[in-house]
Each structure stands twice: as C-alpha cells, then as structure tokens.
Image: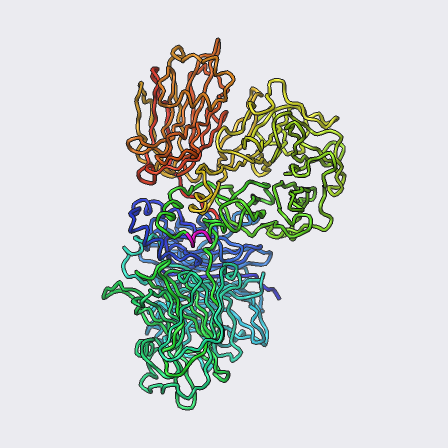
Amino acid sequence: MVILKNLSLCVLLFMSFLLFFEVNASHEINRKLQSVSNNVVKRILRPKFHFRPAKHWINGPMYYNGIYHLFYQYNTKGEVWGNIVWAHSVSVDMVNWINLEHAIYPSEVFDKYGTWSGSTTILPGNKPVILYTGIVDDNQTQVQNYAIPANLSDPFLRKWIKPDNNPLVVADESINKTKFRDPTTAWLGQDGSWRMLVGSLRKNKRGLAILYRSKDFVKWTKAPHPFHSSVNTGNWECVDFFPVSLEKTDGLDTSAIGDKIKHVMKASLDDNRWDYYTIGTYDRKRDRYIPDDAMIEGSHGLRLDYGNFYASKTFYDPSKNRRVLMGWCNESDVFPTDDIFKGWSGIQAIPRKLWIDPSGKHLVQWPIEELETLRKKKVELRNHKLNKGENVEVEGITPAQADVEVTFSFSSLENAEEFDPSWADLYAEDVCAIRGSTVQGGLGPFGLLTLSSENLEEYTPVFFRVFKDQDKHKVLMCSDASRSSVRNHKKMFKPSFAGYVNVDLTDKKLSLRSLIDHSVVASFGAGGKTCITSRVYPALSIYGDTHLFAFNNGTETVKIDTLDAWSMDKADINEANSSHEEFRRLQSSSSKLLKNLFRTEYHFQPPKHWINGLMNYNGIYHLFYQYNPKGAVWGNIVWAHSVSIDMINWINLEPAIYPSEVFDKYGTWSGSTTILPGNKPVILYTGIVDDKQTQVQNYAIPANLSDPFLRKWIKPDNNPLIVADESINKTKFRDPTTAWLGQDGRWRMVVGSLRKNERGLAIMYRSKDFMKWTKAQHPLHSSAKTGNWECVDFFPVSLENTDGLDTSFKGDKIKHVLKVSLDVTRFDYYTIGTYDTKRDRYIPDDTMIDGWHGLRLDYGNFYASRTFYDPMKNRRVLWGWTNESDVFPEDSIKKGWSGIQAIPRKLWIDPSGKHLVQWPIEELEMLRKEKVELRNYELNKGENVEVQGITPAQVDVEVTFSFSSLENAEEFDPSWADLYAQDVCAIRGSTVQGGLGPFGLLTLASENLEEYTPVFFRVFKNQDKYKVLMCSDASRSSVRNHEKMYKPSFAGYVETNLTDKRLSLRSLIDHSVVESFGDGGKTCITSRVYPALAIYGDTHLFAFNNGTEPVKIETLDAWNMAKSEKWI
C-alpha cells in the first residue's frame, strides 16, 4: 500500500490583495493612498495574526520536506478580481509566512485565459504535482492541467513547469464546460489507479463531483457515473474528499484505507458561497460515495463554518499526523472601493486541525497548536457568577488582538426557553436574528461581547442560547455582526451568523474560544463542534478603544468557571518580535508615524545587535544575529535565526541559541559558522559564564540535518571548547571566526582579544578533531593602540578574478584579508597581506596601515561585519550591521526596531591589490521596478536637476559623471594630510564651492532643500597626483536638532585612475538609509538619517554640481525599488 504525503487545496474565492508582508502589487496602490485617513483605515482594521492572501481563493496547500506551501489566487494589479495567477507562500509553522514568486500564470494555449483553482498531490518518489483548472477561451471553457517543479532540490519549489502534454482532462459532451473546475488532491486506489474529482453542474441545479481515473497520472478516463451528486445544490466548487479515523483525532493520508474510517465529502456551493459537508462511506468497488443516513445534503446540511468562510480545502500534514483545514474569509464591507481603500481584500482563517466527533455525526475543528506561540500577556478569571443583565470586562490584555478561552457552567436547565416550532424550518442564523444577544432569555444568551466600544455603541457578541425542544435541549451558537459598527448603509453586510451545537449538556457546561484580530472574530463552540467566523469593521472600537466583556442576558445565573485571555503578537513576517510589547505601549499617532516613516523597505532589519554567523547550507542562506526578544534596545540577547533563498527576502525562525547552560548562562554572544566534512554545519560562539562577563568559546550543532531550515540546535555537554588561560584578558575574549583547515590537517580558528597598552590581537587555536583546541604560542596577528578586537574575520581572496574562495583555500595566486571591528571607534578596518602557513602568522603588505588610519570596509554606519563563502554563486559575501543614528534609546523604542543590515555585498580584491571592492549582490536587482533615465546632461556651476518619475524615498540610482578637464581641481591643503577623510568632508562640504566638485546626488531631499543628504565627489590636486574625496554628509539630513544628535559627515578617499575623466556612483536609498558605492565599489559609505520633511511623497532626488567646472551626467538610471518580503 502506498501512503501519500499529499496536500491539497482549492482556490479561495474573492481573495485579497495583500499578503502578510504586502505583495508587490500593493505598492502602486499604497502610493496613491497615502492620505492619513486611508492609512488609518488600513492599519486599524488590518488583521495581525491571520494570513492575508491576495484575491481570490486557495489553490492547494501542502507539506513537503519540512515546509508548508500555500498556493492561492492573486490579482497582481490590485485588490479586486482580475489578472489572476497562482501565488505561492511558504512557512515552517503555518503562522508566519514568506512570499515567493508566482508558481503558475496564464501563458499557454491550455490556460491562456486563466489559471484557476486546483490542488496538490505528492506522487511516489516524493514528487509533488499541481493539478489546476485552465481557461482556454473567452467563453470560460475549462480544462484540467498539471504542473511539476523545475528543481526538486530547491527546498522552496520556486519554479514550476507546465508540460506540453497538457491539458490532462478535457470535458466531454456530457459536461458543462464552463462549470468544470477545481480538481482535488488525487488518491491511489487498491487497483493501482489514481483517482481525482472535478466539481461541476448538471441540469436541475444538480451539483456533482466527476470522477476520473489514471494508471500513470497522465492519461485520465472519466468514470461512467459521477462519484456523487445532489439535486438543487447548484454548481460545486472546490470539492474536497478525504478519510477520517473513527478511533482517534489523528489525520489520515488521502489514500488511506481501512475498516475504522469514514469519508468526508465537502463542496463549496457557488449559489450561496458557503461550504457544506457530509460524512459517509466510500464504496471502493463501485467508486461511489454514499452519505450516512443522518446526513442532510444541501443548504440545510452541515457547514464547516457558519460564518464568513468559503472555498476551503484540507491537507494531510505528516509532520504532525493531522488533517489541516484552511478556508477563505471574504470581506463584508460591500463595495470594491472599500477593498482598494484598505489596500487588501480577504484573509485566510486560522489553519485548523480537523477530525470526526466520537458521535460520528459531525466534524470537530480547533486552531493549530502553533498559533499558541503568539500568545503573550495572559489574564485569568475564575468562578465568577454572571447574573441576569450583567457584563464583566476582561481587562489587562489588548482586546483588539486576543485569544480567549472561557468555560461557562449553570446549575440547571429548567429555565431554558421553549424552542418555537415555527423556527424548525429556519436556518440557525434566522433564529439568531430573532433571538439576538439583547433579547432576554432563560438560559442565555451568554458569552462574549467582542470588539466592543466602551459604551457598547459597537460590539460583536458571540454567545450561546439553550432551548428546550420537546424532551431534549437545543444549543444555538451565534456570532452577530448586526451591531458591529456604527457605519450604516442599506447594502452593508452585517449578518447574524449562527449554527446549532451538537453537545451533551449532562455536565451543564459550555465552552467557547474566540480569536479576535481587529476585523475578524473566529469562534469555536464546545471544543470546536461548531465554528463561526465573522468579518466586522468597527469605527469606534479600534486599538486602545476596544473592550472585551463576558455577559449574561438570561434570567438563569451563569458561572464563568474559567476564563483565560491572551494578548496576541503579530505574526512575524515584516517586524521582529522585539517590537511587539513596545508597539502596544506606543499606539499614539506620533509613535506609529515615526515607526513607519523611517522603517526601511528592502533592507533586512534585525533587532540589535550584530551578526553572529552566515552560511549557505544546501541552497538556503542562514543568517544568525544577536537579538533582544524583549525590546528594541540592548539586553536579553539570543542567537536569532533567519533564512532566505536570495538574501533579499527573509523568513524569521525561532532563535537558534539562547542562554541555558553553565557555559553560557549569562549570555550567548557573537561567533560564526563552519561547515565540516560530510556537510555538517557547526556554530562557534562566545558564552558568558558569570556576572563578571568571563568569556569562553562554545559550539552548537543542528539537531536534525534533514531539516532544510536547521531550526533546532544542540549545545553538547563537552562545552566549553576553549577557556582563556592566564595570559588572556577573560572579559575581552570573544567572537570566534569561521574555522579553516590547514595543510597539516588541523583546524584553525581565531578569537579577538586585548592586551596591555591597547594592543588588539587575534589569538589562534588549533585542533585535530574540532573538539580539543590548543592555543598557538603566538597570535595570528596583533597591532598596538588599536583597542579590543571584535568580530575578527580572516579569509583568502583571489588575485586572478572576482570569484570568492573557501576559507580553507590554498594556492599561489591569493592574498589574505584580516578584518577587525574596533571596539573603541565602532568601525570595521582591514588589511591585505600574506598568510605564512608554516609559521601560522599573518603579515600585512607594506602599503597597509594597521590601525585607525587604515582601510575601512565602509566609511559610514557600518560595524561588526562578517563574510562567508557562497558556493552557490562562487563568491564571497559581506554583511555588516548599520546602527541607528538617533541618539537616545527611547527613539529606538518609539520606532520599535534598532539597527538594520546593510545590503549583502559581493567582495573581491581590486586589480591593484591595494584595497577591496564591494558591490550589492545581483539578487537585489530583482526588486527594481519602474525605471527613469537621464543621458548626456550637463550640470553647470550651482545647478541641480531633479530626478523625476520615481519614488525617491525607496530607489536604486546609478550615475556616471564625466568632466573635460582636471585643471580646475582645487589644491589639497597640506594641513589636511593627518585628518581623517570625514574631517575634510566637514570642512569642504557640499555647499562649499570648489573647482572639480562637489558633484553628486542630493538624496532624501525636501522640495526646498531644508533637508537633504548629499553623496558627492570632490577632486583635489595633491602635488603631482589627484586625490578623490567621496562624502555622504548627514549634517543637513534633518531639521530635527539636538546637541547630541548624530549627523556626521562620513567620507573616504577613492583609489581611482582618472585618466578617462569619469567617476561613477550608486546609491541605494531606503527611507532612513543611504548606502553608496563610489567608482564601482572601491569606496563605500552608509549613512543613517531621519528626515522630518523629506518623507514618502515629499521626498525628492537631485543630481547637483557646486564646482566651477561643468560636469556631465553621461548616464543616470534610477529604479523604484519594491519592498522585500522579510520577517515576515
């Protein structure tokens, strides 16, 4: 028997525009909708822990090799229907998601007019396949197609191929070709043939599931009879068919067979837009589904959810042996303009585990356990009696973003009101509309008043009402949106949703769980026997003005046995965990504005402090960094962990390392990663063992190498690996490097430290087995008066090409680089030299300056950098941390974040051998969008030219300047010879007229230049040579002024040949960061700035010349930059 790890899903109808991390399509809309009112609406109603996919519905979820994949229909051009593709997101927990490129889009004759919904199946050999509906003409003729991954070794399955033998299934003459869609996950029968279902419609509104069989998954034959059908149900969409166990709550693979199982048939009815199901038997011999006798088919039947819930699909999750349900919750504010106004449309319901009730009469659902990782502050209420008409407020949480579980009990059922026989043929929601929360009853209504305003002008009650129905009792559960908003329009959809709860009241208890998320209330009655999801749009009960009450409006007293309520974090996609508690305290307009104005959009923003280690392992980039889970300031540091497939878009994982053992009880500080023979990664890190900050070197290894994300790490008991001897300053002994393998077969690593007389040094250790390390008799290198060395990095560079080299590379045509982060200056310095492998010493080249006047990787806000060798693209990649420049800790607390990572850079040695060259990794260019150009434009003295047609706050600019002569270059003052370049920049800034220069870019500029950050060149004559100064001057970056505010003039000299009389500049501008690369990356400067005027649409970009010599803009290319999908 073959057990498939299949996963499926169906396209969720009218699905939204914006994913958790805002899909690219939103950018143009957002730019047009930057008014205060629109932004307020967008933020206050936007759910924070529900996944918001783009319009329309789910195509197919699946679990594959440790990763959850969600495919869904998405409008690439807006938040209303149209332009639909199969969008694709991945997750490790179904709570936090990262957006990938689209999996499928219309491109072939068999799907030219549309790629509609479908599912996924995993075939033997662990090979996933997508089944989907293609639209072949403007009559909406539908066929069934398939797609396969282009590269099974890609853990994210980013690229999909549509083979030429499509379509797999074409409707015959008996089928309505325009109602023939949404193929299910396929299952394997006992006869070795595959089976799948396609939803359709016959005459007399008979909905049906058409059965197809195949021996090879390529040639499919229609069965002579439908698998199942039902009259007066209308068109069946998003059909789902799966087995459930009668013995336990575990899930079953779709192909499972056995005696102790039932099968579920679910259909999304196009006529009323709800999801219905029946439970029954799968007759394998006849290939028919037979519902149990007690089942009602059609609009009076069982529903998965009695609220805003449609086009759902389930999949089997083998990692936790469960069946998971995902469904789409559409918007309830009526008009398409509402969706455009908000910038998103529709959300996914929280994924739910699903199983059959012991009674066999219905299914049970419960939010997946991973959701509980978002629970934060908790409040409790115990044994509280609610008398008639009483409300009790649940205080101490954030009621607009909460998870609430409550158990009610009552002493008697005698006072339950009689169920009116005239209601017998009504839907439950009609009864709820008649007997709402304000209508006094006997036993009930009692429950929760969610998303309530203080004086109850607005509220969404979720409640029970118990009826006597002849000799039994009947429990009605309601979620009533009729009073959810003071906004009123005759077409506004504020329904009273309801369902009956099949529950035994012998113990006289009823439980309720409600997930409240700004504009959605998802409720689970009696442990998930009945579920209702409501979409609501309050105008008064938003953020801090939201309240939560428990209430009773029945004559019978009800007791709250237990009530547990948690504030819920925002799911981690764009923002890091550290900010969550601060966000709740800082919900004022000013703090929210500050947070959004300065937050970068395509730079990775980890929490403070710096990078620990980087690596590419099996095609995935791993970034480890120091992170405070309790705030945006220093302290409580763990090794956070994020992964990416391109170093631009990131997903946050749980921390890899945190203080827990005697060898790191007081801190897990920085370190590095090394990949050992056999493709085994290891982390080396500094542990703090006492409150004196005594430092030791430890290691950690992955718990499971088959996990593509390496989520769990183990710290073996033989730690620490290295303890400082008496010759070492034990409190300045940290940040072990990536280890390298010597020609003698021994491993080597270096640890930064400090000796007397401010001598910084790199202490070398050797090991034969990576476990027992011995200190060398001498350091690898040291330098007097440099202070403590942190984050030491040591690596080879090729003298023959720009390719990177593995850290252990040996050869003749190489040099070595030693980089140190100087604790005193907080800058990163490097030298180029020779590694004497016989003596295990590093010798800088004669031209190198070893100290504060030496070469720097970046002459701006850049510290604690690391490099790693990327075997995927045969390059060495540099990452650095860019700290904040607004001085006070409260600034970081207000923003909710502190520090960003500079854009990853490819790094190599200049042909001169005198310095390194850096350039943003090529992957960044995939974020480039609209482009503007300027060619052969002459800039005369004092002239500015605006670069128009882009979004200057979020842009990538490349410009080449040329000049006809060097004769007018000003003389370099000999008194400046001992000054740092930035001191010269402060003296000769952008406003000081020169000869050849200053010329360059005015970035993040206000219209009238009250604010700007100039990035520019100035050419000097220096005896018989020319000297090029490059500056990035933040001194005029903001009209905000404080004597301690850090607005420096950063600068470096550019080692360049001016024979061709050209200088090039590239600047990456991202709201509060300007990252610039002079003359092809020979000199790099990163500035952090915080304008008050030059924000969003009020930002401008100019090219300028303030020298007497005319300068020509030969080429200027500027691109709007999309927001990267990070943290997400």
Confirm whether residue 288 shows in the render. Answer: no
Q: Is residue 995 magenta?
A: no
Picture coordinates of residue 635, whole percent (x, y): 55, 46
Q: Residue furthest bottom?
A: 471
Picture coordinates of residue 172, whole percent (x, y): 40, 64
Snapshot quadrant of residue 440:
bottom left
Q: Is residue 478 left or right of residue 325?
A: left
Count of number-bearing discs = 0
Q: Quadrant of the N terminus?
A: bottom right
Depth check: give the residue in front, 275 or 535.
535
- Residue depicted at 37% across the width and 78% down the height: 445
Depth check: give the residue in front, 693 or 999.
693
Q: Residue furthest top?
A: 1024
Snapshot quadrant of residue 730:
top right
Confirm whether residue 559 shows in the render. Answer: yes
Depth check: give the residue in front, 878 or 66.
878
Picture coordinates of residue 1077, whole percent (x, y): 46, 28
What kind of secondary structure does the magenta stretch mostly adopt?
helix
Q: Is residue 691 left or right of residue 856?
A: right
Q: Residue furthest left?
A: 490
Up-down: is 1115 above or below 97? Answer: above
Q: Residue furthest front?
A: 1043
- Way the structure is coloured: rainbow
Segment colored magenta? 581-585
Q: Is residue 345 left or right of residue 700?
A: left
Up-down: is 1089 above or below 943? Answer: below
Picture coordinates of residue 771, whole percent (x, y): 74, 43
